[in-house]
Image (cartoon, coloured by chain):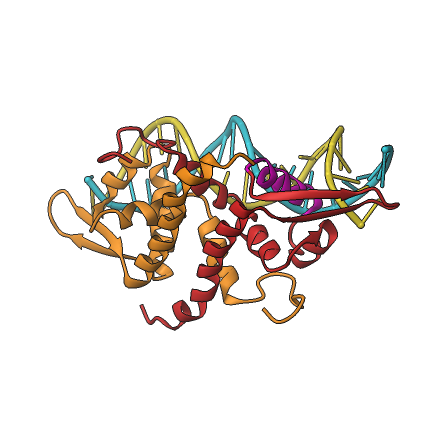
Chain colours: A red, B orange, C yellow, D cyan
DNA sequence: CAGGATCCACGTGGATACTG
DNA sequence: CAGTATCCACGTGGATCCTG
């Protein structure tokens, strides 16, 4: 931050989060999960049809590591896994929701 | 949107914008330009050292097409090109700035 | 059902050179 | 200076198969 940015990039913790939401699908996931109280893996996958299991699980793991998403596993047979947002995740989801809510306005803009 | 989301993805205009900020570097660029009144190409590139000219010009073109960024070219020798945010761009930049401002708090979270 | 493992195709983006 | 064009390496992600 400072002045003109001495360090080229990765200069502040903000960069970490900007990069996080710039990672394909993370914004979608955080927003989607935020619209529900909790969601199962398959449920998320169904809504984001274009995401493969591999990528979805990678993203959920990343978001979990970064503290935006919690994970609860129930030892049923077959297995049930639930995901939801931590307080931190809800804050991010709310921010993303601002974009979602603005989108209709933005589409009206002539420029 | 609706209920459980009939359309898998691309279901609403919001998706376009979520995808936009999920595109590598766009969030950084919009935020950075928003911190200044206007910036020259080389100036932006200097701050985002890891971005190549190719990608930077692609992203600026994209953001311009989507109406978030304006472009002004002055016919000096050598050429001078300035970029800045449209009202729409400023709104987006402000949203992204919320993330930047939250980042320090988020780093404190223990989870 | 939830997701790890593998293999590989494809597209994104980097390096370089060049132009108005 | 502000890009564009080309060529190509590399990594991301898709498809498939498999397991707790």
Seen from the viewer's position, the closer of residues B100 and B73 is B100
Residue A71 position within the rendered picture, expressed as x and y whole percent measured from the top left: 68, 43
The residue depicted at 22 percent of the width and 35 percent of the height is A3
Residue B56's quadrant in the figure? Answer: top left
Seen from the viewer's position, the closer of residues C1 and B58 is C1
Seen from the viewer's position, the closer of residues A55 and B105 is B105
Residue B82 position within the rendered picture, expressed as x and y whole percent measured from the top left: 20, 50
Residue C13's quadrant in the figure? Answer: top left
- Which residue lies most toward the left here? B76
Position of residue B2 in the picture relative to residue B101 (left or right): right
The residue depicted at 28 percent of the width and 50 percent of the height is B34
The residue depicted at 46 percent of the width and 66 percent of the height is A101
Magenta-drawn segment? A52-66
Position of residue C5 in the picture relative to residue B75 (left or right): right
How many numbered callouts? 0
Residue A37's quadrant in the figure? Answer: bottom right
- Residue B76 to residue A4: above or below: below
Residue B32 position within the rendered picture, expressed as x and y whole percent measured from the top left: 30, 45
Seen from the viewer's position, the closer of residues A61 and B7 is A61
Assess whether residue A59 is covered by the magenta stretch: yes
Quadrant containing the C terminus of chain A is bottom left
Q: Main secondary structure of the magenta part?
A: helix
Quadrant containing the N terminus of chain A is top left
- Residue A26 to residue A94: above or below: above
The residue depicted at 56 percent of the width and 39 percent of the height is A67
Assess whether residue B5 is covered by the magenta stretch: no
């Amino acid at each position: 931050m400072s002045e003109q940015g001495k360090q080229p990039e990765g200069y502040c913790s903000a960069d970490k989060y900007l990069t996080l939401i710039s990672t394909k699908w993370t914004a979608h996931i955080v927003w989607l999960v935020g619209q529900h109280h909790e969601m199962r893996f398959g449920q998320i996958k169904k809504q984001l049809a274009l995401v493969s299991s591999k990528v979805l699980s990678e993203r959920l793991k990343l978001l979990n590591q970064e503290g935006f998403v919690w994970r609860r596993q129930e030892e049923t047979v077959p297995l049930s896994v639930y995901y939801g947002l931590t307080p931190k995740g809800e804050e991010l989801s709310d921010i993303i929701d601002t974009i979602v809510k603005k989108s209709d306005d933005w589409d009206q803009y002539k420029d």
